[in-house]
Image: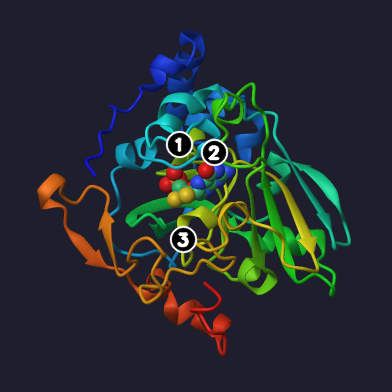
């Protein structure tokens, strides 16, 4: 498949001029992550974020920012790879709140600013492998999901974590229109031990700045050893539950998408092989280079023990 990409949309084209100019002034200085909450949405979107570099980062070449922000899956804005980059600027991301409830001691609706205070922000450079057979290397800015869950106080009965994306058809064109590609809200889930794993992060930024809308602003999940669709964007609710929660892609087609969705070159998708992948930005057309896909996306040393004794073919 030949993929055409539109040029990156300059922020000056999608932001009222006055805000854009203010933003330029604003990012002139160094802005600490902790002040993100004190600034408006348009400014926050472009804010530089100071974050310590995490030793959990890969040293592989980082994907160009332009590729990572114009080649996306975010079906709330359409099913085309260029739809999110072209359309997601319509989403209002401030004010934003995240409800954390279910089997926790302190159920609450947190403001985004409060969630961001859960732990220091870090830059984590992770491989992202999409189930469709492409991959990128992205410098996320985030913090362990475990920090938020521990703050809420996970009760002993909780075995899974369920996540939910915003439903707002007025600002998400993929949720209005005649063709609805998926049931809304987009929902995802992790087993509690996966959610608590130090590699699992909530990200609020990438490439040294706050997240662009098309990449899941203002807060998304990143689980680097699982196929990209587990990394749910624009999260509004996190619920601790006792039984395995439904997930969007499994609900849509359980034969093709399982709950675990661990990257596994030995377990093919029913319609295509998962043995290799195309790293976005490496060649095009006839010259596309494919590289072998690694077990658990290269994070086997850290996560394989979570699945000891589990049949990974049956539990895809
Ligand atoms: N989250 C929501 N809410 N809606 C989506 O359509 N797509 C998923 C995931 N999170 C999706 C989502 C898929 S299929 C992938 S591969 C990643 O987001 C892509 O993330 P990126 O666009 O930042 O690379």
**Does 54 appear above or below 76?**
below
In 3D space, how far apart are the residues under numbered discs 3 and 2 (Cα atoms)? 19 Å
Q: Residue at x 57, y 90 (%)?
A: 309
Please provide percent x and percent y for residue 246. 69, 58
Q: Is residue 285 left or right of residue 47?
A: left
Front residue of 167/29: it is: 167
Secondary structure beneath dot 1 equals loop
Question: Left or right of 64: which side holds 114?
Answer: right
Instruction: Determine which residue is flagged by label 3.
Output: 227
Q: In the picture, residue 167 is in which quadrant? A: top right
In the rendered view, tell whether residue 182 sits above or below residue 129.
Answer: above
Kindly identify which numbered label has been placed on residue 79.
1
Mark 3 surroundings within 10 Å by alpha-carbon count, few (fewer than 14), some (14 through 19), many (20 or more): many
Question: Percent x, y for residue 310?
Answer: 57, 85
Q: CA distance from mark 1 to mark 2?
A: 7 Å
Residue found at x 60% / y 36%? 36
Residue positioned 69% across, 70% down in the render: 192
List x then y, in percent, for residue 277: 28, 61
Residue under the point 40% across and 15% down: 13
Disc number placed over residue 181 in the picture, else none: 2
Q: Closest to the observer: 32 or 236?
A: 236
Residue 204 visible (yes or no): no
Q: Residues within 10 Å of mark 1 (few under 14, many from 20)?
A: some
Q: Residues within 10 Å of mark 2 (few under 14, many from 20)?
A: few
Q: What number is the disc on residue 215?
A: none
Of all residues, the one furthest to the left in this rendering is 287
């Amino acid at each position: 498949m030949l993929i055409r990409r539109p040029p990156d949309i300059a922020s000056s084209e999608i932001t009222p001029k006055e805000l854009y100019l203010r933003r330029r002034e604003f990012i002139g200085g160094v802005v600490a992550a902790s002040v993100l909450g004190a600034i408006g949405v348009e400014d926050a979107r472009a804010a530089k974020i100071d974050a310590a570099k995490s030793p959990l980062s890969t040293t592989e070449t980082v994907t160009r920012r332009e590729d990572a922000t114009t080649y996306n899956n975010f079906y709330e804005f359409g099913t085309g790879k260029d739809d999110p980059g072209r359309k997601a600027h319509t989403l209002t991301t401030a004010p934003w709140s995240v409800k954390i409830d279910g089997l926790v001691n302190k159920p609450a609706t947190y403001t985004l600013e409060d969630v961001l205070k859960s732990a220091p922000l870090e830059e984590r450079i992770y491989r992202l492998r999409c189930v469709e057979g492409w991959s990128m290397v992205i410098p996320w800015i985030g913090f362990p999901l475990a920090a938020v869950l521990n703050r809420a106080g996970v009760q002993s009965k909780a075995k899974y974590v369920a996540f939910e994306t915003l439903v707002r058809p007025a600002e998400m064109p993929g949720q209005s229109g005649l063709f609805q590609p998926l049931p809304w809200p987009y929902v995802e889930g992790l087993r509690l031990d996966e959610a608590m794993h130090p590699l699992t992060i909530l990200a609020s930024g990438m490439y040294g700045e706050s997240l662009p809308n098309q990449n899941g602003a203002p807060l998304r999940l990143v689980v680097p050893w699982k196929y990209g669709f587990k990394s749910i964007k624009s999260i509004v609710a996190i619920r601790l539950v006792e039984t395995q929660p439904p997930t969007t892609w499994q609900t849509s087609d359980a034969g093709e998408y399982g709950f675990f969705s661990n990257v596994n070159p030995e377990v093919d998708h029913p319609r295509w092989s998962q043995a290799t992948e195309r790293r976005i930005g490496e060649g095009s057309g006839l010259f596309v280079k494919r590289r072998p896909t690694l077990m658990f996306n290269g994070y086997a040393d850290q996560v394989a023990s979570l699945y000891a004794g589990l049949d990974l073919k049956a539990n895809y």
